[in-house]
Image (cartoon, rainbow, N blue to C red):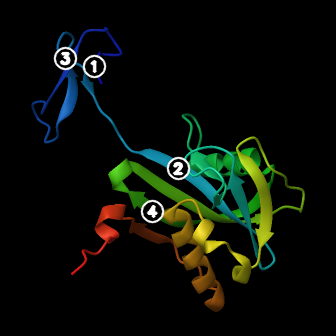
Amino acid sequence: MKFCNLCGHSVSQHVPQGDSRLRYVCDHCHTVHYQNPNIVAGCLPTWGTQVLLCRRAIEPRKGYWTLPAGFMENGETVEQAARRETLEEACAVVENLNIYTLIDVPHINQVHIFYRAELQNLEFSAGEESLEVRLFEEADIPWSELAFRTVSRTLECFFADRAGDIYPVRSEAVPPLASLIKPQQ
């Protein structure tokens, strides 16, 4: 950030009085510009034993499979965002939404929230951000072609929980990729 979005003057970074974090502060009007994480909302839509996945038509991870999800907009609830993203990406209507995973992704300043949901019917198709949309049985999930670790983790939890038919709300964090790589000895 270089300029204040209120008065247009330059900003600098420092810890404002009464705060404990480095912030962008306007050098002229002294407005503190807070930057907060983005929320990604989505659904894990099911039809019987199958899960609906979308093949991404956009970057990042174009061509990879994902659950329908995207950034929450101002003025909507998380559930509304999850429904909207499912409609936009899979042209699918979902019902019986239950919050399922809340995954912090602090290294990219995001929080991913997925709802378990049921497809209202089998009327779905690829939206503008999807190349194709398909139902998958657990054995057919293209694990090596999934776009994001939050999607992989949500699916792993779902199939493990489905075995006992108990679906607790899961909250965890995804570490940066570099911390997952073990040094060679």
Q: Position of residue 167 (x, y in %)?
A: 59, 79
Element type where label 1 sits in the image? loop
Camera-near label (2 vs 1) is 1
- For disc 1, the marked residue is 2
CA separation in Å, label 4 and label 3:
34 Å
Q: Which of these two is toward me, 34 or 177?
A: 177
- For disc 4, the marked residue is 103
Q: State the residue at coordinates (49%, 65%).
A: 149
Q: Position of residue 148 (x, y in %)?
A: 53, 60
Kindly give the residue lying farthest to the bottom in the view shown.
164
Element type where label 4 sits in the image? strand
Q: Which of these two is toward me, 16 or 180?
A: 180
- For disc 2, the marked residue is 40
Of the two numbered discs 2 and 1 on the same chain, state the one appearing first in sequence.
1
Of the two numbered discs 3 and 2 on the same chain, state the one appearing first in sequence.
3
Q: Are marks 3 and 2 in contact (CB under 8 Å)?
A: no
Q: Position of residue 144 (x, y in %)?
A: 59, 71
Q: Tell me where residue 152 sits by quadrant.
A: bottom right
Q: Amino acid at mark 2?
A: Val
- For disc 3, the marked residue is 30
Left or right, 38 with respect to 146, comes to left
Q: Relative to residue 129, is residue 48 depicted above or below?
A: below
Q: State the residue at coordinates (62%, 82%).
A: 159
Marking on residue 55: none
Q: Amino acid at mark 4?
A: Ile
Q: Relative to residue 67, is residue 39 depicted above or below?
A: above
CA separation in Å, label 2 and label 1:
26 Å
Q: Amino acid at mark 1?
A: Lys
Camera-near label (3 vs 1) is 1
Quadrant the N terminus occupies? top left
Q: State the residue at coordinates (33%, 53%).
A: 107
